[in-house]
Amino acid sequence: MNTRIRELRKQHKLSQEELALEVGTTRQTITSIEVGKYTASLVLAFKIAKFFGLTIEEVFDFSDIEQ
């Protein structure tokens, strides 16, 4: 799944570690989400989107998920 997390992090001048602390996860999890090796849980996706003041759909690209 593609996300805008890396782009948003850089716009806000945040490291992966700083974002992880803000949303209650680990740097490794943020790294894995950014490179597409891990899909965030709904709760984590909500926390990340809320942190940036966006909706989940504005942060996460669901276009490649089968219906």
Image (tube, grey):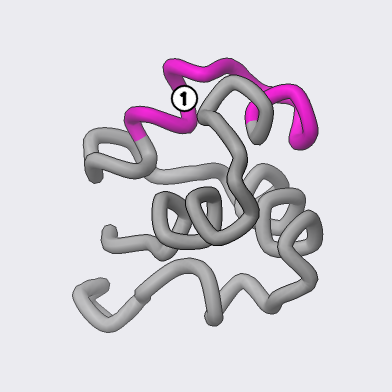
Provide residue 8's location: percent of width, then percent of height: 53, 60
For residue 25: magenta?
yes
Per the picture, the main secondary structure of the magenta-coloured stretch is helix
Instruction: Quadrant for the C terminus, please.
Output: bottom left
Provide residue 55's location: percent of width, then percent of height: 68, 78
In the rendered picture of this protein, how many numbered marks are placed on residues?
1
Q: Residue at x 27, y 59 (%)?
A: 1
Q: Which residue is mark 1?
A: 29
- Asked if residue 14 lies left or right of residue 40, the reply is right
Provide residue 30's location: percent of width, then percent of height: 47, 32
Q: 12 and 37: which one is in front?
A: 12
Q: Residue at x 72, y 62 (%)?
A: 52
Q: 39 and 18: which one is in front?
A: 18
Q: Is residue 19 above or below residue 46?
A: above
Q: Residue at x 79, y 62 (%)?
A: 50
Q: Secondary structure at mark 1?
A: helix
Q: Residues within 10 Å of mark 1 (few under 14, many from 20)?
A: some
Provide residue 3's location: percent of width, then percent of height: 38, 61
Q: 25 and 64: which one is in front?
A: 25
Give the residue type at disc 1. Thr
- Asked if residue 48 lies left or right of residue 27, the reply is right
Residue 2, picture quadrant:
bottom left
Residue 54, picture quadrant:
bottom right
- Asked if residue 33 lies left or right of residue 36, the reply is right
Q: Is residue 46 above or below residue 28?
A: below
The stretch in magenta equals 20-32
